Amino acid sequence: MLRFVFWSLLFLNAALFVYAQNFLGSSKGSEEERARIKPQLEPARLTLLTSAQAEAAKAAPAASSAPEPAASAPAQAAQEEAPAAPAAAAAPARPLACIDVGTFSAGESKRFESRLASLELGERQSRQAVQAQDVTSYLVNIPPQASKEAADRKAGELRELGVTNFFIMSGDSPMKWAISLGVFKTESGAQILLAQLNKQGVHSARITPRGPQATRYTYRFRDIEAAQRERIVSVADAVSSAEVKNCR
């Protein structure tokens, strides 16, 4: 019995020795293949998948390669007909103005233009000469009558109303056969007399400005901005009591 165990152990040791020395058909090519593959394996990066995960991984490439469904005809037509959005909203246009300023005397006109020279308005600024009256006094009067006889009759009516301070105007002038009731340097003084005459029953009297005809100037400014308009009005107020009006 002991002899059997001894020979069995000896046989097993010999077999293990032969296996270890690659005497059982291990080829040089197999050893080189194992040496090539071993460095390519990275056990730390290997992940074990369940059967469900493996099936899902197989299905993923097929789903990603499937073609996208074509858009429906109405949706495609709507996209083609939709207008393209503007690249950027247009900036709001700045409002421009047109104004008439005047009137100015010859001296005032020169001062006005010299103070506006810095604006360099060019063709947007224009000047027009007009004939106007330089008012030096205010005449309270009854308008010209048709003849001297008519003027005399009107004078008789004034006397009956208690008005005695008047005279009939004659000579070759537009005021021939008018009846003068008073001359004043200011319009307010003329208004006071006119109110008194109305209380006395004289309702045909009026106030007429008097003075020589003279050339005056008005200005038109086109396509000007708000800041330029303010500057023009400020200069006009400093030079004269000129009127400012909007124009087309």
Image: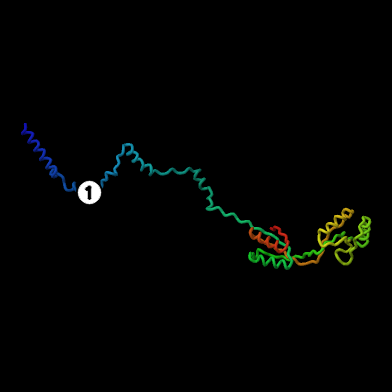
In the image: residue 247, left or right of residue 206: left
Q: Image point 30% across, 41% down: which residue?
A: 47
Q: Which residue is mark 1?
A: 36
Up-down relation of residue 131 to residue 5 (above or below): below
In the image: residue 145, left or right of residue 77: right
Q: Which of 148/29 is in front?
A: 148
Q: Spot the residue most to the left.
A: 3
In the image: residue 8, left or right of residue 128: left
Up-down relation of residue 222 to residue 84 (above or below): below
Picture mark count? 1
Chosen colour scheme: rainbow
Locate the C terminus and report the quarter of the image it occupies.
Answer: bottom right
Q: Position of residue 99 (x, y in %)?
A: 69, 59
* Quadrant of the image occupied by residue 236: bottom right
* Quadrant of the image occupied by residue 51: top left
- Inspect the image, locate mark 1, and give the three-letter code of the amino acid beneath it: Arg
* Quadrant of the image occupied by residue 137: bottom right
Quick one: SS at disc 1? helix
Q: Image point 94% across, 56% down: which residue?
A: 160
Q: Image point 34% across, 41% down: which residue?
A: 57
Q: Which of 116/41 is in front?
A: 116
Locate the N terminus and report the quarter of the image it occupies.
Answer: top left
In the image: residue 130, left or right of residue 173: left
Please rate how many residues cluster around mark 1, counting C-alpha atoms within 10 Å: few if below 14, some from 14 to 19, many from 20.
few
Q: Position of residue 232 (x, y in %)?
A: 67, 61
Up-down relation of residue 127 to residue 48 (above or below): below
Q: Position of residue 207 (x, y in %)?
A: 83, 59
Q: Which of 55/177 is in front?
A: 177
Q: Position of residue 214 (x, y in %)?
A: 77, 67
